[in-house]
Image: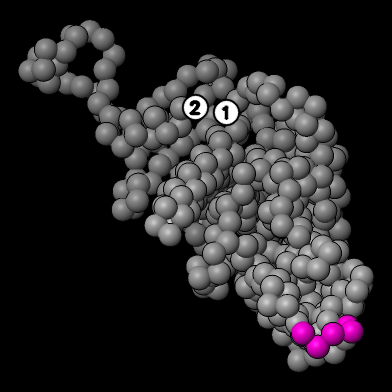
Amino acid sequence: MATKFRVELVWTEGEGKEAASIFLTSDGRVILQGRGVPAQEREALALPRDADLISVDRNHIRAIKDML
Amino acid sequence: MFLRNYWYVAALADEVRDRPLGRTFLGEPVVLFRTADGSLHALEDRCPHRQLPLSMGKMIGDALQCHYHGLRFDGSGQCVRVPGQDHIPAKARVRTYPVVERYRWIWIFMGDPALADPSQICDFHWLTDPEWGAKPAYLHVEANWQLVVDNLLDLTHLAFVHETTIGNMALVEHAAVKVQRAPNNVLVTRWIIDQPAPPTFVKVGKFTGNVDRWQIIDYTPPAFLRLDVGASPTGTGAPEGRRAGGIGMRNLNAITPETETKSHYFWAQAHNFEPDNPDMTDRVFEQIKTAFLEDVAVFTAQQRAITLRPDAPQVDINADAGGMQARRIVDRLYREEQATAAHATAAE
C-alpha cells in the first residue's frame, strides 16, 4: 500500500475525555479506531451479517462533525 | 476578524522607552511610552483635539505632548495642559489600555479592561529562564495573522519553502502526524525515531549515532505558537518523556493583528544547550531567522493573492488538519465573544 502520509486526529472533550483516533490517509480515506462488531451483536441488533462493521465511541461522531 | 478579550504582544520590552512608540493593534491606533519611573502606558494614538497621532509628539516630563497644538496627556489619558488657556475641556482625554511587561515583551489588552487578568498571559518563560538561552525579534508582516498561524501549524511546507535550510522530503513523504484537539488548544506532534541527526544537531548535540527527534507545536488562541523541537540518542527514552542527553530548542511565536491584512510578528528562539553562551544564542537565532524570512515571503505573497480575489475557493489537504482546527477554535471564540458583547449591549 502506498500510503505514505497520515494524520492522526485525537479530540479531547471539555471534561478531559479523549475520543479515540481518527486517521486521515494520503490515499483519501478516513479510518476510525473502534472495535469490530461480533456476530452475536449483529444478530441481536439485526445488523448486516457480512459487512465490515465497527463500533465507535460517540465522541468520534462529535469530532467528525467538528472536523467536517 | 479579531478576538479582543485577550492579551497580545505589543512590543519588545526594549522598544518602549521614554519616547512614544505608535503601533496599530486590531485596527486601533495605540501609543506606548514609559514615564520616568519606568512604568508603562498605552493610550489611544489620536489627539481628541484634531486627531493627529500622539505618537508624533514627544515626552515632556511624564506627559505626552501632541505635535500639532501642544496638548499634553498623562499616563491615565487625561489632558493636563492646553496651551494658551486654563480651562481643560472635560472631553479632552483618550482611552487607555492595560499593559504588562513579561518575558521581555510588552503585553496589551485590547478588549474590556475589566477582563484584563495578567494571569491569563500565555506562558513564554523560556525567554527569561536562566536554564535557556534566548533571543527575541520583531517582524512587521503584510499578511493576515491567521496565515501566519496556518504556516506554523503545518510541518509539510518545510520540505518546499525551506528546502535549502531546515527541510527535506522525508518530512512529507513518510510523515505520521498526530493532531490533538482540546476545546481551546491544538497540539501537533511528530516523532522521527532512530534516524541520523541533521548536521546542525550533530554540531551542537555532539551525537555519535542515530537519534529520536521530536517536533511538537502547541497552539493557544488567538495566535500563540510554541514549537518544541529537539533530539536525544535513540533508545534513551525521549518518546516516553526522558530527554536527558539530548538537546532542545523552543521556537516561540506571538502574532498580533495590526489590521485584517497586516500583522506584528514577535518571535524568539530559545535553546537549552550552552544557555549562557551568547555566541551560541546568536548562531541558533541566525539559522532560524533565514527560514523565517522564507516564510514571510510566502505569506505576504499569499495575502497579495487573497486581496486580489478574496472569494477564491481553497482546497484543503491532510496537512492542513492542525491549521483547520485552530481556525475552528478561533471561529467559535469569536462567535462567543460577539454574543457576549451583544448581550451586554442589550442589557444596557
Secondary-structure class at tag 1? helix
Magenta segment, prevailing SS (helix, strand or loop): loop
Q: Is residue B292 left or right of residue B182?
A: right
Residue labelled with disc 2? A24
Q: Which mark is residue B318?
A: 1
**Where's residue B50, x and y in %?**
84, 64
Highlighted range, magenta: B83-87
Q: Is residue A40 left or right of residue B90?
A: left
Say above or below: B54 vs B289. Answer: below
Residue nearer the viewer, B78 or B114: B78
Q: Quadrant of residue A10?
A: top left
Q: Say which residue appears at 49% left-offset and 48% top-offset.
A: B338
Q: Quadrant of residue B69?
A: bottom right
Q: Say which residue appears at 65% left-offset and 21% top-offset.
A: B313
- Under mark 2, the amino acid is Leu
Q: Is residue B281 left or right of residue B42?
A: right
Q: Say which residue appears at 82% left-offset and 62% top-offset.
A: B51
Residue nearer the viewer, B29 or B133: B29
Say above or below: A19 vs B47. Answer: above
Say above or below: B36 vs B291. Answer: below
**Where's residue B293, x and y in %?**
85, 47
Residue B6 visible (yes or no): no
* Labels 2 and 1 touching (C-beta < 8 A): yes
- Under mark 1, the amino acid is Asn
